[in-house]
Structures are given as structure tokens and as C-alpha cells.
Amino acid sequence: MPDTSARLRTSFTAVGVPVLACGMALAGLGVWTTSGRAGSPPHVAVTKAYVYQPTGRTPETAAFFTFTNDGGSADRLVHIASTDTVEPPRLSEHRMTSSGGAYRQPVGAVTVPAGDGLTMTPHGIDVTVRPKGTWRPGEEISFTLRFAHGKPLRIRAVVVRPGEQTDPLPHP
């Protein structure tokens, strides 16, 4: 005759472990919900925007944006437009070759994490632009940033000399 206590232990392990795991998951979801973040949409804003003044004979330059997202879910920057560029701006990432050369690799979209943000830099993610006309330091360049979930943002980036940055955006 099989040992009854061994059968009960096996049954408890088979049923108890999944029930315990579900209980822990529900407790975690409860904490997340009471924090006010569960299911809230992304809320992306731009706090800094600048573009390098083109130099020499190089037809392209780069724009940089600092994003915040105080919403409860991440969003993705999926498209950038500008009436001040010859062709549509492109998201790109700075890469290095094994021999130390630098190049830009196109990127389809960039995630702006929830409760955090994203800062574009010359050594990471940026926006490659081809200026229409001559851009001078202090000039403002218009951009429209489109996201997978949030509303489009229309912003103006200040032209700066390469290597400089700007203060946070003075415009709402």
C-alpha cells in the first residue's frame, strides 16, 4: 500500500507551487496598480534639443534630443520630420570599426523607457540631418517627432558649434 503522506506531499508540491507563484504575481501587480502607474500611457517630453552646425564640406550633421517619460509605459520614437532639411532626418547610432574608424548605422526606432528617459549623444544614438541652406549658431531648426503611442511633438532645436550643448529648452 502506497504511503499516504508521500502522496499528499507530492500533491501539495504539484498544486501548491503554482498557487504560490500566482499569489506572488498578484501581490506584485497589486503594488504596481496602487502606485498609480499600471496601464498609464507614456508621457514623453523633450527637455533639450540642439543640432551641430555643419562644418567644412560635410553635407550632414547631427541633432540631439533629451527625452523624459514620466508615464507608466515606454514609447518608441519611430519617425522624425523637418522642413529645414533637404531629406528626412534619420535615426542613427554611432559605431566604431575594429580599426578605430567611426560610422553611423541607421536605426529604425528608439525606445524611451517609462519612468526614465533617453539622452542622445554624439557617441550613441543621434539624428542624422542634411541641412537646407546654411545654419548658424543660435538659429532654431524645426522638428516633428512621432512616437508609436504618444502624440507627435513639434520642437525647435538650437544650432550650436560641434562639441557644444544647449541649456534646457526655453520653449514650452
Image (cartoon, helix red, strand yellow):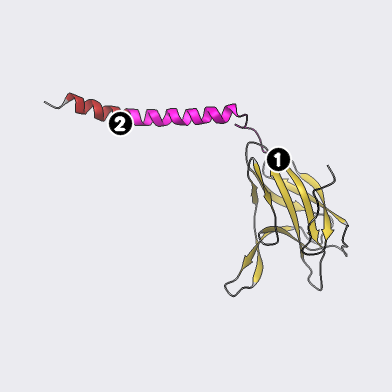
In this rendering, position of residue 103 left or right of residue 56: left
Q: Point out residue 85 in the picture as x, y percentages from the top left corner.
A: 82, 59
Q: What kind of residue is marked 1?
A: Gly
**Is 108 left or right of 139, judged from the image as shown?**
left
x then y, percent, for residue 70 = 68, 38
Q: Which residue is mark 1?
A: 150
Residue at screen point 30% across, 31% down: 14
Q: Say few, some or many: other residues with alpha carbon within 10 Å of mark 2 (under 14 / 14 to 19 / 20 or more).
A: few
- In the picture, the quarter occupied by the C terminus is top right
- The answer to which of marks 2 and 1 sits earlier in the sequence is 2
- In which quarter of the view is residue 2 placed? top left
Secondary structure of the residue carrying numbered label 1:
loop
- Where does the N terminus fall, quadrant-wise? top left
Which of the 4 image quadrants contains residue 98?
bottom right
Q: Residue at x 70, y 40 (%)?
A: 150
In the rendering, at what x and y percent does residue 129 appear?
A: 77, 61
Residue at position x 76%, y 46% from top? 47
Disc 2 and disc 1 in contact, CB within 8 angstroms: no
The magenta segment: 16-42
Q: Main secondary structure of the magenta part?
A: helix
Instruction: Residue at 64%, 57% (x, y): give it.
Output: 107
What residue sits right under mark 2 in the picture?
Answer: 14
In the visual, does 42 lie left or right of 2? right
